[in-house]
Amino acid sequence: MRKSPRSHHDSTLDDVLASRLARQHERHRYRRRRTTVGIGPRFQREGCEWLAFCSNDYLGLAGDPRLAEGLAEGARRFGTGGGASHLVCGHSEAHARLEARLAEWTGCQRALLFSSGYQANLGVFSALLGRGDYALHDRFNHASLLDGTRLAGARLMRFAHGDAKDCGQHLAMLDSARHKLVISDGVFSMDGDVADLAALAEQCSRHRAWLMVDDAHGFGVLGANGGGTRQSQGIDPAVVPVLVGTLGKALGTQGAFVAGSDALIEALIQFARPYVYTTSLSPALAWATLTSLDIVRDEPERRDHLFTLVERFRNGAVGLSAFGLHLMPSRTPIQPLVIGSTREGGDNAVAALKLASALEAAGIWCTAIRPPTVPAGTARLRITLSAAHDVADVDRLLEALHDCARRLGSAQESPT
């Protein structure tokens, strides 16, 4: 007997996944991990040293030996693992001390630790929102914020990026809604620009909405004391009732926190599922983060040096527009360089990959960011600067960018 042809219902799991992976290749969206040795702006990879401009270690603390010593001391005192969730027996003295310091640092009544920024965001939504409630997002918010809304069952709406007036117009249509939460990044991770928190807070006050700010990329970097976007804009803590920050970027360790009122933190302890059902953050890491906070407080010269590098890079990158490389208007350590055309529907992912590859040939590691992480037609190099870089590093990057852009542009213009 002849065998019946296989239908799509007969496909194995590997068949289905192979098709999806092939499609990812075709769309130039396939991502690969690279194994590294070392920490800081210089990594060893595949037997070679690379000067990296793609890390979120903005203050250069991830490789600071004082944090390593704090981590070792924390491991000796409290162990390496939490052992259980915070609500069972996993909440140690290290966690309690760090939460108290973070509350003081942010000017809030209390703070609550989470194992990652992703979990912190999911935890807030699971505790504060449910079906019938509304979450109004800046269009460029981080994926974890969008995922948290969907998992909570709330209705997701978006306002135009950085446009508080558009946010207010959306809120005006929701005046009868039970709960409304407006959510914005403090510093936007792919564009490097900063939200106008006062304008958003005004709209929230007018329409009886709550404001949540994810300051993952601002905390430790912006503000006179590294207090983040809110501090840099002179915003009273009470104006932003829900503040999220991470420890794995400027602070150089791992984890995240939510800061706010006593009532907010108690509600998260009771109702935030990613908090209730997760083993606590390593107490050794929590102990090391106390050292990190001391350094951020006591060494403002790190931030001063970082922003000197930002200005040097921006001044040196002016001429890149002649090669179709467009530097976005960011004054933070995130310096996105959009490749070629940004017309709607255009696909510049291949050009971004070529430029990243050319930089790699020059010993510089800077990842190409492609859709869906960024909108179609805006593929870019997401260049990030660190206080661990020096002026010579930035000059080397600028020289390589100009050289690679010139060579790639000439190759495109050459007749076949």
Image (cartoon, rainbow, N blue to C red):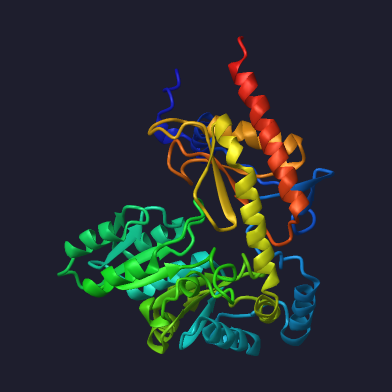
Confirm whether residue 35 shows in the render.
no
Rendered position, 186 above or below 84? above
Q: Is residue 412 left or right of residue 190?
A: right
Picture coordinates of residue 55 (x, y %)? 65, 55
**Percent position of residue 85, x then y:** 56, 80
> In the figure, is residue 236 to the left or right of 408?
left
Q: Is residue 373 above or below residue 71?
A: above
Residue 162 falls left or right of residue 340: left
Q: Which residue lies furthest to the right in this view?
A: 47
- Residue lying at 70% horizontally and 75% vertically, measured from the top left: 299
Q: Residue furthest left?
A: 176
- Find residue 204 and report its horizontal and vertical position in percent: 28, 71
Q: Which of 177 and 294 is in front in this view?
A: 294
305 or 365, nearer to the observer: 305
- Front residue of 30/277: it is 30
Query: Can you say which quadrant of the picture contains the C terminus?
Result: top right
**Which corner quadrant of the image does residue 96 belong to?**
bottom right
For image coordinates 48% across by 46% down, the residue present is: 373
Residue at left offset 24%, top offset 63% = 168
Location of the N terminus (image quadrant): top left
Residue 4 located left or right of residue 87? left
- Picture quadrant of residue 271: bottom left
Q: Is residue 389 in view from this perspective?
A: yes
Residue at image point 71% right, 68% down: 61
Q: Please state the total of marks drawn on the protein image.
A: 0
Q: Which of 293 and 331 is in front in this view?
A: 331
The image position of residue 32, as x and y in percent, is 64, 42
